[in-house]
Amino acid sequence: MLHKPSSPPGLFTACMSHVSINGLEAMSAIVFLVISAARPVPFSREQLVTSDMIIANEPQESVRDLCQVLAVDAPEKVVVLAKDTPSRRVRRTYEDFWRRVAAEAPDIVLYHTDCFETLILWLESMCSSPIRALRLSASFAAYRLVDGFIEVGTQLRKRLASIQRQLSTEKRDSGISQRNDSARGAKKRPAQGKEKKKELSPKGKALANKVDELNAKNSEITELSDRVYRSIFIDRHRDIYAEVRSMSLSALGG
């Protein structure tokens, strides 16, 4: 998968198309992508990562079995660290793919499936494997994935701020504001009957619902980012492999 679509957009488009058709197959292909970025393997994706493994949702056990295969006749070369021009191109494609996976994933995939929770579980397990090449490629993936989450969160907060301003305007136009509410509490007039409660216009209600939706999405994105930080960044910055430590410190801003 890593070597066929030659550009990040081509690789990303192929992946998202696959997700919409068969999520399990797509997840298997993405896990295999991490493996093939670690080192060339003489096995097909179907031989190493199956849909049944994704369904079982026991990535630690599956990664342990994968490591036994990867440890056999393991070459020293790590695909995403090689200095030759083709390998550098592969590395750029790989990193950009992972950023785009989060930043450009359809909402239905990002917020309404467990794709990313499952993916992070697999990355956690691969980042803890005894195979240093696999730890490296999985760490690359995790850090760029978080870059994508940050990009999504930034855009969400911009939209949220804009809609909150519109909502405030609608509330003022409807006579609903904190200032008015406090003033009514301070200056009570003898009631001739219950004062009719002021309500938002239909547009205002739609804006309020949108604010709630964006806040919920922002919370989900923040939780996904925090989970990668807690389960991967913290451990990998103490990795025995210098390249993984350096990458992790860079991702942590160190």
Image (cartoon, rainbow, N blue to C red):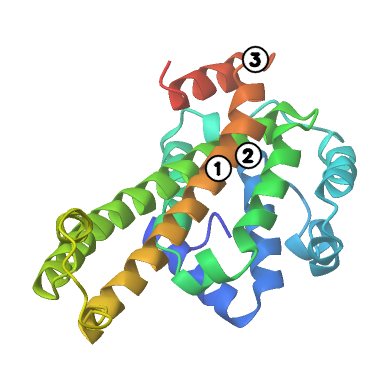
Mark 3 and mark 1: span between their CA atoms? 18 Å
Q: Amino acid at mark 3?
A: Arg
Q: Amino acid at mark 1?
A: Ala
3 or 1: tag closer to the N-terminus: 1
The structure residue drawn at horizontal position 39% and vertical position 65%, both measured from the top left corner, is 212
The structure residue drawn at horizontal position 29% and vertical position 78%, both measured from the top left corner, is 205
Find residue 169 and report its image quarter: bottom left
Q: Quadrant of the C terminus?
A: top left
Query: For mark 2, what is the residue?
Result: 138
Secondary structure beneath dot 3 equals loop
Q: Nearer the viewer, residue 150 or 81?
A: 150
Find residue 213 and report its image quarter: bottom left
Residue 139 position in % (x across, y down)? 59, 34
Q: What label sits on residue 238 in the rendered view?
A: 3
Secondary structure beneath dot 1 equals helix
| CB atoms of marks 1 and 2 within 8 Å | yes
Mark 1 and mark 2: span between their CA atoms? 5 Å
Residue 164 position in % (x across, y down)? 23, 60
| CB atoms of marks 3 and 1 within 8 Å | no
Secondary structure beneath dot 2 equals helix
Query: For mark 1, what is the residue?
Result: 141
Mark 3 and mark 2: span between their CA atoms? 15 Å
Kindly tell me whether residue 78 is visible in this rendering.
Answer: no
Q: Nearer the viewer, residue 121 or 214?
A: 214
The structure residue drawn at horizontal position 62% and vertical position 32%, both measured from the top left corner, is 230
Q: Quadrant of the N terminus?
A: bottom right
Q: What label sits on residue 156 in the rendered view?
A: none
3 or 2: tag closer to the N-terminus: 2
Which dot, 3 or 1, sits closer to the camera? 3
Residue 151 position in % (x across, y down)? 35, 48
Q: Amino acid at mark 2?
A: Ala
Residue 60 in the image: above or below residue 190: above
